[in-house]
Image (cartoon, rainbow, N blue to C red):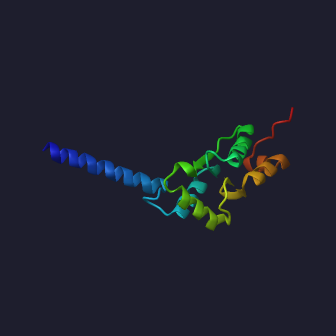
Amino acid sequence: MAVMMRSGAVAAALLATLAAASLFGSSMGASPAAFVKKTVAAHEIVIFSKSYCPYCKRAKGVFKELSKVPYVVELDQRDDGWDIQDALSEIVGRRTVPQVFINGKHLGGSDDTVDAYQSGKLEKLLGVEKKEDL
């Protein structure tokens, strides 16, 4: 009886894991391209990044200046990061990081993000007021 209960608990845990994988689009449940599209659609700001990349840190810093918290996918910390990066290449035509999305639309990389911030375009896209330079 204990073995049956343990097997049932293992099966339930496996089903929960599979359900979560398909819900969140991991490589177990969805294609990398589907994961990218679902993630971009689900969040106001998405940054596909690598944790050690100075350009990624620069792009993330822009949102910190705006007091906005982006949803960040650190590709170097995921088993399927390489596949997601390949999917990004197919979707936006660039394999480099960061790749920034605002309200479901591709903004670009680090330079594009900084340029949009400096020009005021980013604030308009996000509906926030730019902080005055001191």
Quadrant in the picture for the N terminus: top left
Image point 64% across, 50% down: which residue? 47
Front residue (pair 95, 42): 95
106 lies above or below 61: below
Q: Is residue 120 left or right of residue 92?
A: right
Residue 2 appears left or right of 125: left
Residue displayed at 19% across by 45% down: 5
Q: Residue, x 54% and y 55% (percent of image)?
A: 81
Which percent across, then down, holds residue 48?
Answer: 62, 52
Q: Residue at x 68, y 40 (%)?
A: 68
Give how far across and how far down residue 87 sits, in percent: 58, 64
Residue sticking out furthest to the right: 134
Residue 106 visible in the picture: yes
State left or right for residue 107 relative to residue 88: right
Residue 102 visible: no
Instruction: Please name whichever residue, 90 or 105, is drawn nearer the observer in this view of the structure.
Output: 90
Look at the image and tell me in which quarter the C terminus lies. top right
Relative to 78, residue 68 above or below: above
Where residue 122 appears, x then y in whole percent?
Answer: 77, 49
Q: In the rendering, at what x and y percent does residue 128 appear?
A: 76, 42
